[in-house]
Structure formats: C-alpha cells, structure tokens
Amino acid sequence: MTQIPQSWRQEKHVFCFGLKLKLLALLCLIGVCVGYTIEKNPQVTDNEWHVWRVTHKKAYKDLDEERVRYAIWKDNVQYINEFNAQNKHMKLKINHFGDYTNLEFRYLTNGLRVENRTSKATSFLQQGDYRLPDSVDWRSKGYVTPVKNQGVMGQCWTFSVTGAFEGQQFKKTGKLVSLSEQNLADCVKGFGSIDNGYNYVIENGGLDTAEGYPGPGKVGECRFNPNAIGVTCTGWADLLKGDESALQKAVALTGPIAVGFDASHRSFQFYSSGVYSEPDCSASQIDHTALVVGYGSEDGTDYWIVKNSWGTSWGEKGYVKMRRNFNNMCGIATMASYPYVGR
C-alpha cells in the first residue's frame, strides 16, 4: 500500500478538499502494478468494465489513461471479491470510486485535518437519568434530508454542518429545509471545519437555503444572500471526546449529530452493506466528516446509522452502519457536535 509522505500528514485544522492527481504522477504511484493487475484478473471481463463505465458515466482523455484506469479498476474488483469471500457480516461492491487508487480516493473525498476544539463551544451535559431507546432512526421522523453528493468539491465538513442544522431546525419548526453547502464552502474563511462552519453562521447572521444559494460544485466567490436565509445559530455543543455513551445520549435526546472519523481505508471506499468494522481504523487520525442519524443493533452487533455525502450509489443508499460500542470504532465519537438554532 502506498504510504502518504510525512509532510502530507494533517495535524491541526479540519477541512476537506479535492485533489486531482495527474496521470504521470499516478503512473509513478502504481508503477509496475498496472501489468500485474491485468494479468492477475482474467476472470473480470471487458463487458463488465464497459457496463461499469456506462453506469458511472466515466470518460478518459486518451487511451493511455483508460488503460491505467482499467488496471486500477480490475485490481479493485479483485480486492472486493477476495474480501467478500472472507467476510460474512460486511460486504463491499464496486462503485463510482472503482477506477481510483486508495490514495486518490483519500485525497478526492476526505483530507481532513484535526483541529483543537474551540473555546466558543459549550459542552454537552449528561445530567439526569434517562432510559434511552434501544434504537433510534431520525430519518423516519422527518429530521433528515435526502443523501447528497459532495462530488470532487471535497468539502465534506459542509455536509455535516448543514445536516446537523437541518435536523435541529426541523426539531424546532417542524419544517425540513435543505441548506446550502455551497454557502459554507465559498464563504468560510481560512480552513473549513465543522466548528468554523457553526461560527460562520453565528457571525454572518444565518446560512442560506440550498435553493437560495445553489452551487456549481466547486469553491468560488462568496455570494451570500441575506434574503435566502434558512437557519440562524446561537452556539453549539461539543460532546466529550471518544465517549460513545455521550454520543448515544445526544443522538437519542437531541437529534442528528455531526461527527468525524477515519474513512481512509479501502474497505470504506467500497463499503456496500452490513456493519462496518475495520481492524486498522484509527480513533485519532480523523479524515472525514458525516452525520449520525440514529443507532441500533443487528444480530447482536451494535451500530451507528451514519449519513454520508457520496451519493446513493455508495453504501446502503448513501448510508453506512458503523460498529458501535467497540472501542470508538474509527473515531466515530472523537469529534461529535451539534448546533443551537436561532430560528
């Protein structure tokens, strides 16, 4: 597996960004593996490749790039087949990331940097005895907008921020309104992060609706429209770092919660169904954000219901069941928070 240079590692702030690797750099990364993967996957047919390309609308600039992508795709198909043969409780499938190396995938979709939590946040208080339900799913209560797709914009934190606001706004008003990730991507200065997103909405006096501030899918000039505000914010709460009990209580009593976690692994890149569990996951190397919208259990295994921002062709129609109560799997409770809405 290609190692990321130490100088690329992230230490302080939290942000997501898109990075397109040039073909020459990609060839240098995968080297002789191109020939190897073509040889090693004779069972994968050209027709399957063609169907996948048509399904995901893939086009390449020339034959050389197509050959490289084909080799990567075949290697990923082999990995998925071998994984599924060895695992009963979690399955993978080829998806729109199928022609990306894992290194490309990580930089196109994730790329978070972990920041020190701001002193402006309040702490989530766990006072009182509550009998929490065995399962919660805020989707069934109307708190959650349809799954969105960040594309190559890469600003995953914006989707966590809007998702948390959308749920809290619905809780307060009974109206579910899709909010603008593009507003956050364009207008938050410096490093984008969940906390910085909350703070922007406070200082700006609001966040636009998705309809009032549509996006081209890439970061551009700030075009905030004060006549299209969909939500305001008075503050936010950070949950105790790494405490899954606090996260469960917050989800059950408050609603959907913005979270960060380690999504860097090939198993997550091609996750399809079942309860996600990755032995190599880190609880501290957080590189992606999403939204916990509930929790439950399956065949005796506890899980979180997590809304991702990679479209409905990834995972379980855009969601992943992340293993719960298992040593803070992938850091799911490491940086959880939710906002206080003003209107």
Image (cartoon, grey):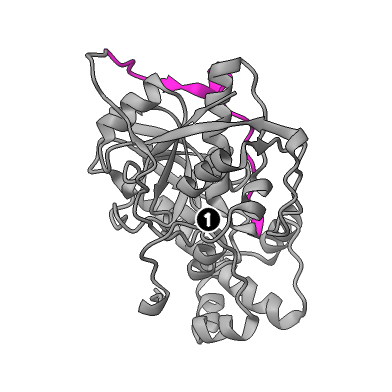
**Residue 244 visible in rendering:** yes
* Quadrant of res 342: top right
Q: Which residues are magenta?
A: 131-152
Of residues 190 and 128, the one nearer the viewer is 190
**Position of 158 compared to 303: left or right?**
right
SS majority, magenta:
loop
Q: Quadrant of the C terminus?
A: top right
Of residues 204 and 323, the one nearer the viewer is 204
Q: Residue at x 75, y 72 (%)?
A: 60
Of residues 247 and 240, the one nearer the viewer is 240
**Residue 5 visible in rendering:** no
The percent position of residue 176, horizontal first and vertical second, equals 64, 23
The percent position of residue 42, horizontal first and vertical second, equals 56, 70
The percent position of residue 13, horizontal first and vertical second, equals 42, 60
Q: Dot 1: within a 10 Å radius of its alpha carbon, few (fewer than 14), some, or many (20 or more) residues? A: many
**Position of 299 compared to 65: left or right?**
left
* Residue where numbered disc 1 is placed: 192
